[in-house]
Amino acid sequence: MAFRLSSAVLLAALVAVPAYAAPTTTKVDIAAFDPDKDGTIDLKEAQTAASAAFDKLDPDKDGTLDAKELQGRLTEADLKKLDPDNDGTLDKKEYLAAVEMYFKAADPDNDGTIDARELTGPAGQALVQLMR
């Protein structure tokens, strides 16, 4: 029960303070993350895209991303919040856990999918940053 409460508090903090500089436009090409072309992104699709993004962001192939390698996708404060082992980096498991948290926050109707409209909110935009 304590884990749920702390996760909810963390999620609320992350959603309340976007982890990136908001783009000038909120239009997102959902097709880039929608391989089955159903017009929505499910968690598996989001994690697949984010996993590929993680691999591209990890030029030294050490299996972790530090603030520099994240290239502004997360603020230093958010990196600290999402880093349970406090080593100053995110491994792929931690990165994908962040993706799952943003996905759930961007899915207010809890239907298990994100559509283009849901990607325009703060959590959706943060999710897009982690999938790019």
Image (cartoon, grey):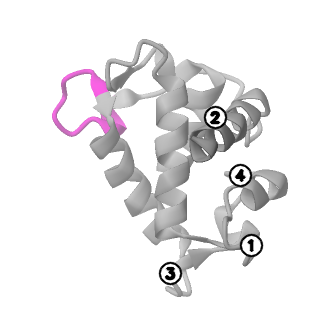
Question: For this rendering, which residue is in front, 18 or 1?
Answer: 1
Residue 22 x/y as whole percent:
73, 31
Q: Residues within 10 Å of mark 2 (few under 14, many from 20)?
A: some
The residue beneath circle 1 is 86
The residue beneath circle 4 is 74
Residue 112's place in the image compared with 60, above or below, is above
Q: Residues within 10 Å of mark 3 (few under 14, many from 20)?
A: some
Q: Is residue 132 visible?
A: no
- Badge 1 element: loop
Earlier sequence position, callout 2 versus callout 4: 2
- 37 with respect to 73 (left or right): left
The residue beneath circle 3 is 63
Alpha-carbon span between mark 1 and mark 4? 15 Å
Alpha-carbon span between mark 2 and mark 4? 19 Å
Residue 78's place in the image compared with 1, above or below, is below
Q: Residues within 10 Å of mark 4 (few under 14, many from 20)?
A: many
Earlier sequence position, callout 1 versus callout 2: 2
The residue beneath circle 2 is 8
Question: In percent of the image, x 46 and y 44: which residue is there?
Answer: 100
Question: In percent of the image, x 53 and y 59: which residue is there?
Answer: 95
